[in-house]
Amino acid sequence: MLIAFEGIDGAGKTTMSTRLHKELLNRGMNSFWTTEPTDGPVGKIVKEILTGEMEADKRTLALLFAADRIQHVVEMEPLLNKGSIIITDRYLLSSLAYQGLDLPMEWVREINKWARLPDLVIYLDLDPEVALRRIGDGQIFHSLNTLRAVRSNYLSLIERAEWSSRTVKVDASAPEEEVFRTILNIVMMKLEGIQ
Ligand code: TYD
């Protein structure tokens, strides 16, 4: 089972996805945690572009995110076929929500056609102002206006047929413990459903 965490920067994806991973391990499950952009060669180039060390056209960046994801999926596949649980901090919806801001959404979807759909998406929904306050002096790649547009993309994407059946929207403004309990319930219900 592939579980993807999605949301704007600062929504708490990393905290929640790593907590979930540890909890599943504690319960004796075969869980793996991973993230996009990856630490692979293409992911490294993506990170250099995000931090401004390297320049690239938006189309180039979109193709790099997609290429990084293809490699990621190739590495995941054997584990998934063995019945492992993979938790990924960002996946395909990130490309649709972020690259879809400046590029035709259909094209971004098309270049990502090799990425298998996740079985479950936990979309952490948060007001961008709260998210930016949370990030504080941390690495901020986007302005408030951009994050507002990304959030609105996420909110409309998860209503689409391709995503609505596999996505659960979680209010990420609640206290950490409460958000985590909600996520754990959702995941345990999903896991029981497929057994
Ligand atoms: P990430 O390392 O997840 O940052 P954070 O932990 O702060 O959320 O992702 C870095 C940036 O890359 C983030 O701003 C979102 C962006 N991104 C895309 O634009 N498209 C994508 O497909 C992915 C995976 C990430």
Image: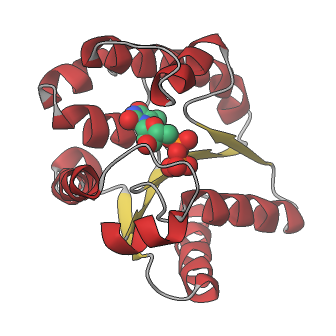
Residue at x 42%, y 68% (from the top left corner): 131
Q: Is residue 61 above or below residue 140?
A: above
Q: Nearer the viewer, residue 109 or 186?
A: 109
**Image quadrant assignment for residue 159:** bottom left
Q: Nearer the viewer, residue 61 or 85?
A: 61
Residue at x 36%, y 12% (from the top left corner): 56
Q: Name the spot of residue 65 as percent of width and height, x first.
A: 43, 22
- On the question of residue 167 being in view, the answer is yes
Residue at x 62%, y 19% (from the top left corner): 44
Colouring method of the image: secondary structure
Q: Name the spot of residue 133 as percent of width and height, x first.
A: 46, 72
Location of the C terminus by quadrant is bottom right
**Image quadrant assignment for residue 189:** bottom right
Q: Is residue 142 above or below residue 82?
A: below
Residue at x 15%, y 56% (from the top left corner): 156
Q: Nearer the viewer, residue 138 or 13?
A: 138
